[in-house]
Image (cartoon, rainbow, N blue to C red):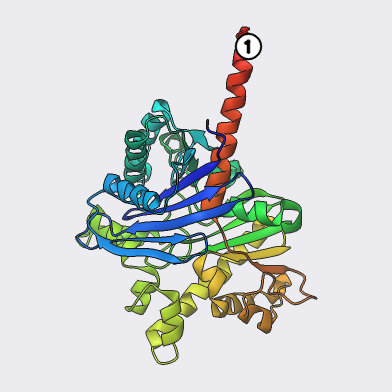
Amino acid sequence: MSGAWRVLCLNSGSSSLKFALYDLNDGEARLASGAVEQIGTGSGRLWLRDAGDRLLEDSPGRFPGARAAVQAALGALAALGAATPAAVGHRVVHGGPDHDAPERVAPPLLAALRRLVPLAPIHLPGAIEVIEAVAERFPDLPQVACFDTAFHRRMPEVAQRLPLPRALWDLGLRRYGFHGLSYEYIVQSVGAAVLGRAVIAHLGNGASLAAVRDGRPLDTTMGFTPSGGFMMGTRSGDLDPGVLLFLLGRGYDGAALERLVDHESGLLGVSGMTSDMKTLLEQRAHEPLAAEAVEMFCYQLRKHVGMMAAVLGGLDTLVFTGGIGERAAAVRWEVCRGLAHLGLRLDPGRNDAHQPVVSTSDSACTVRVIPTDEDLLVARHTRAVLESSRGKSRADVTRSGRT
């Protein structure tokens, strides 16, 4: 392992590849970040920013698959003058029931990920292809997989089980939860003792809540897939199973249901306009459907905060993170407005200014706004896993007498 701890973090989505390069030698400096977007279409785009968040490149391109996206990202970093990283860390959406911690990539792990593809058919194939593309370009470069579901594996079994026949548990049907890297980052940033009984709200195009007590997850809103929980940008959240059965009887098949639940519902479906919360907030004064979409989102979010508070037996901290959580002051205000019974009192000035603490000084529950950084957490995990494996290798050599 090179002594230079530069870690490249790759986050593969269904049609995008986000990347960030960190230098962990002296602090945790982000050297560059960017994304390859609209993979698999004829109208792709690559953008790159430097350490000062200055836009260096924003250009169209054709990226037929994940391999092409990886090559484009690596090429952009090389053009910036960035040296080959010491390691690559990957955000992997799903680790299934058995992968509850970051792992160094090796053939057995790749085989396990291929077996898990039915649990995340939209995301896992691309993630596997990205890992393989990096290995083709840099065969000796160590890679680490960091699972978005791992954080929730410590939830009590009663929270992980679905009310289904027990044999289905053995097939992997359970509540996995997602956004785990974001939640873990928040716990590390604030501290488990400071958070106490906390509800963390990760609010973006995908959105979920986690109930965390003293750093340990007790429950979360997403379940078997990232489609569950409360309404999101284009996802429906939880539905009465009878709705799906009704639609099956009206000619919908699996593909049509997937489009409906994941791509045509949520804020987009209710407003008939957009999934973008910023636009809906701007339009709601004169667009009734935009107003209703925002109201439904805040109502459902407030209801789920109450559910998580019941799991915790009270609430010491409420954290807003993710794009909506960090930037939509109106959403935070409308969610908290109906939670006074839990001791929440927001300061309007602090909230509008997006300060780190937006509650009043006499609020019984501290309300925080904390930008998440899943990439940085992946970089930290990557270094920790590789340092641990290097230490184990040295110990094995010592035990064998080959010093």
Return the residue found at the far right.
362
Image position of 246 with respect to 176: above or below: below
Identify which residue, 278 or 251, lies in the foreground.
278
> Residue drawn 30% across and 57% down?
258
Q: Is residue 265 visible?
A: yes
Mark 1 crowdedness (10 Å alpha carbons): few <14, some 14-19, many ≥20: few
Return the residue found at the far top.
401
Measured as percent of width and height from the top left, residue 23 is found at 55, 47
Of the residues shown, which amino acid type is indicated by label 1?
Thr
Please state, as top left, top right, bottom left or bottom right, where the C terminus lies in the image: top right
Return the residue found at the far bottom.
286
Q: Is residue 374 visible?
A: no
> Residue drawn 65% across and 56% down?
311
Q: Which residue is mark 1?
A: 403
The number of numbered discs placed on residues in the rendered structure image is: 1
Image position of 286 with respect to 159: above or below: below
Residue 304 sits in which quadrant?
bottom right
Residue 366 sits in which quadrant?
bottom right
Measured as percent of width and height from the top left, residue 2 is found at 53, 33
Identify which residue, 284 or 163, lies in the foreground.
284
Q: Secondary structure at mark 1?
A: loop
Identify which residue, 120 or 49, lies in the foreground.
49
> Residue drawn 47% across and 43% down?
174
Measured as percent of width and height from the top left, residue 180 is found at 54, 50
Image position of 171 with respect to 72: above or below: above
Measured as percent of width and height from the top left, residue 195 is found at 72, 58
